[in-house]
Amino acid sequence: MAWGKCNAKSDVQPLAYDDVREETDLGSQHAILATHQAAQAITGCLERDRLKNGGSTAATPRHRPIAYDTRTFRPADSPNDSAPVTGSRS
Protein backbone atom coordinates (compact mmCIF):
# COMPACT_ATOMS: atom_id res chain seq x y z
CA MET A 1 0.00 0.00 0.00
CA ALA A 2 2.76 2.43 0.91
CA TRP A 3 5.41 1.32 -1.58
CA GLY A 4 6.06 4.11 -4.05
CA LYS A 5 3.83 6.50 -2.09
CA CYS A 6 5.43 7.10 1.29
CA ASN A 7 7.88 5.70 3.81
CA ALA A 8 7.50 7.86 6.93
CA LYS A 9 5.88 6.14 9.91
CA SER A 10 3.41 9.01 10.25
CA ASP A 11 2.34 8.54 6.61
CA VAL A 12 2.25 4.73 6.49
CA GLN A 13 0.21 4.34 9.68
CA PRO A 14 -2.99 6.07 8.52
CA LEU A 15 -2.64 4.45 5.11
CA ALA A 16 -2.41 0.85 6.33
CA TYR A 17 -3.70 0.70 9.92
CA ASP A 18 -7.35 -0.14 9.19
CA ASP A 19 -6.44 -2.89 6.71
CA VAL A 20 -3.94 -4.41 9.14
CA ARG A 21 -6.62 -4.48 11.84
CA GLU A 22 -9.24 -5.99 9.49
CA GLU A 23 -6.97 -8.64 7.97
CA THR A 24 -5.19 -9.77 11.16
CA ASP A 25 -5.93 -10.50 14.78
CA LEU A 26 -3.53 -7.80 15.90
CA GLY A 27 -4.58 -5.38 18.59
CA SER A 28 -4.34 -1.65 18.16
CA GLN A 29 -0.79 -1.19 19.46
CA HIS A 30 0.53 -4.15 17.50
CA ALA A 31 -1.13 -2.89 14.31
CA ILE A 32 0.55 0.48 14.82
CA LEU A 33 3.91 -1.22 15.35
CA ALA A 34 3.35 -3.31 12.22
CA THR A 35 2.79 -0.17 10.14
CA HIS A 36 5.97 1.34 11.64
CA GLN A 37 7.95 -1.77 10.72
CA ALA A 38 6.60 -1.57 7.18
CA ALA A 39 7.76 2.05 7.00
CA GLN A 40 11.23 1.07 8.23
CA ALA A 41 11.41 -1.73 5.66
CA ILE A 42 10.53 0.66 2.84
CA THR A 43 13.11 3.16 4.09
CA GLY A 44 15.74 0.41 4.21
CA CYS A 45 14.98 -0.63 0.63
CA LEU A 46 15.16 2.95 -0.60
CA GLU A 47 18.48 3.46 1.21
CA ARG A 48 19.90 0.24 -0.25
CA ASP A 49 18.86 1.30 -3.75
CA ARG A 50 20.37 4.75 -3.23
CA LEU A 51 23.70 3.23 -2.18
CA LYS A 52 23.66 0.77 -5.12
CA ASN A 53 23.23 3.70 -7.48
CA GLY A 54 26.33 5.47 -6.19
CA GLY A 55 24.81 7.45 -3.35
CA SER A 56 26.98 8.61 -0.49
CA THR A 57 26.97 6.94 2.92
CA ALA A 58 27.93 10.19 4.61
CA ALA A 59 25.23 12.22 6.28
CA THR A 60 24.37 15.42 4.49
CA PRO A 61 24.13 18.37 6.88
CA ARG A 62 20.91 20.32 6.53
CA HIS A 63 22.16 23.44 8.29
CA ARG A 64 25.56 24.94 8.69
CA PRO A 65 27.17 24.43 12.11
CA ILE A 66 26.97 27.31 14.54
CA ALA A 67 30.23 28.46 16.11
CA TYR A 68 29.77 29.83 19.63
CA ASP A 69 31.94 32.50 21.18
CA THR A 70 33.49 30.89 24.29
CA ARG A 71 33.00 34.06 26.38
CA THR A 72 29.33 34.59 25.63
CA PHE A 73 26.23 32.51 25.12
CA ARG A 74 25.59 33.53 21.52
CA PRO A 75 26.69 32.51 18.04
CA ALA A 76 30.15 33.95 17.36
CA ASP A 77 28.98 35.75 14.23
CA SER A 78 25.83 37.23 15.81
CA PRO A 79 25.74 40.98 16.52
CA ASN A 80 22.67 40.52 18.77
CA ASP A 81 22.60 40.80 22.55
CA SER A 82 24.43 38.09 24.44
CA ALA A 83 24.47 36.69 27.93
CA PRO A 84 28.00 36.82 29.37
CA VAL A 85 29.31 33.56 30.71
CA THR A 86 31.12 33.90 34.03
CA GLY A 87 32.55 31.48 36.55
CA SER A 88 29.73 32.22 39.00
CA ARG A 89 25.97 31.78 38.63
CA SER A 90 25.06 34.60 40.99
Image: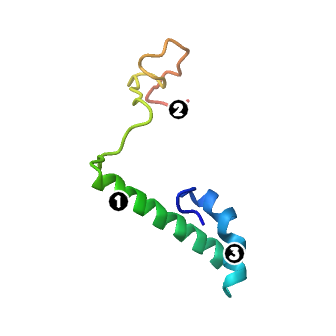
Query: How much space separates mark 3 and mark 1, taking CA atoms?
Result: 27 Å
For the residues bearing labels 2 and 3, Cβ distance under 8 angstroms: no
> The residue under label 1 is which amino acid type?
Arg
On the image, numbered disc 2 is attached to which residue?
Answer: 89
Query: How much space separates mark 2 and mark 3, taking CA atoms?
Result: 57 Å
On the image, numbered disc 3 is attached to which residue?
Answer: 19
Helix, strand or loop status at disc 1: helix
On the image, numbered disc 1 is attached to which residue?
Answer: 48
Q: Quadrant of residue 36?
A: bottom right
Which residue is depicted at the point 48% across and 30% down? Answer: 88
Q: Is residue 5 above or below residue 79?
A: below
Q: Position of residue 25 (x, y in %)?
A: 68, 88
For the residues bearing labels 1 and 2, Cβ distance under 8 angstroms: no
Question: Which numbered disc, 2 or 3, marks the residue that appears first in the sequence?
Answer: 3
> The residue under label 3 is which amino acid type?
Asp
Which residue is depicted at the point 49% across and 21% down? Answer: 84
- Callout 3 environment at 10 Å: few (<14), some (14 to 19), or many (20+)? few
